[in-house]
Amino acid sequence: MRLRFAPAPIARRPLALLALAGAAACAPRAAPLVGTPAPAGLPEARLSGSRRVVFRWALDDASLRARGEGVARISAPDSARLDFFLDGGMGGGTAFLIGDHVDAPGGDLVRRLLPPPALLWAALGRLAVPAAADTAARLLGDTLRADIGRDPTFRVTFVDGRLRGVARIEDGRRQEWVAVPDDSTVEYRHEGARRHLVLTITRADRVEGGFDASIWPH
């Protein structure tokens, strides 16, 4: 949104702050943890071996709707390559996730598709939120939820010991999140940007011997 008011810096600054506050207010308040207090230790959520995952993707945000196909090549312990292709042969792009760094030479569309590293890793089955001493966990039935860190807080969700979601909470509001409700669906939402991405997995294969080194950046 462009603001057209008097150009004096003293007038623009409060308006900019109000715009930021309005965007933050779009995010819903995070509900408190519920259930029985649980030990802070969490189940392991690590990569093992190499996998090739084929998926359909659909992106909706405030200024763009796009659909297409993609493939993720994921290699333990902490490497992934993601290729996205627009429907109709209209182009595509590539991103590399190595450790806690994302490189998206594929252009602006690919950058808009991807969550930040901690949430992107959750979409791929790996827990990689920043370590923090402040951790609280509660168990409700088969669901374990834990809040890690403080402002931002990362709320992680395990169901039957499997990582099913990570949310980033700031100022008491859930700003963005990844959910993996089942083995065929991944959902990402950024509340302030009104960005919503859904991946529908159509095939997932183990790759014996790993991937050729040529697929990785040099």
Image (cartoon, rainbow, N blue to C red):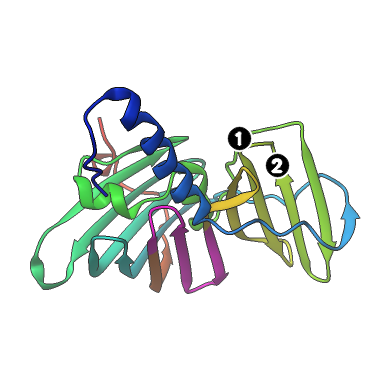
Residue sitting nearer the eye, 189 or 139: 189
- Residue named by callout 1: 130
Is residue 79 something one can see in this rendering?
no
Residue at image location 88% in from the left, 53% down from the top? 38
Residue at image location 30% in from the left, 61% down from the top? 62
Residue sitting nearer the eye, 6 or 212: 6
Residue 127 at x, y percent in the picture: 60, 47
Question: What is the residue that sits farthest to the front in this orientation?
Answer: 6
Residue at image location 63% in from the left, 45% down from the top? 154
Please state which amino acid type lies under the numbered disc 1.
Answer: Pro
Q: Is residue 143 left or right of residue 23?
A: right
Residue 66: which numbered mark, if any?
none
Check contact, mark 1 vs mark 2: CB within 8 A. Answer: yes
Residue sitting nearer the eye, 195 or 21: 21
Residue 67 at x, y percent in the picture: 24, 70
Residue at image location 36% in from the left, 54% down from the top? 73
**The image quarter in which residue 104 lies:** top left
Q: Is residue 146 above or below residue 6?
A: below
Per the image, label 1 sits on a secondary structure element best described as loop
Please state which amino acid type lies under the numbered disc 2.
Answer: Ile
Q: Dominant secondary structure of the magenta stretch? A: strand
Residue 148: which numbered mark, if any?
2
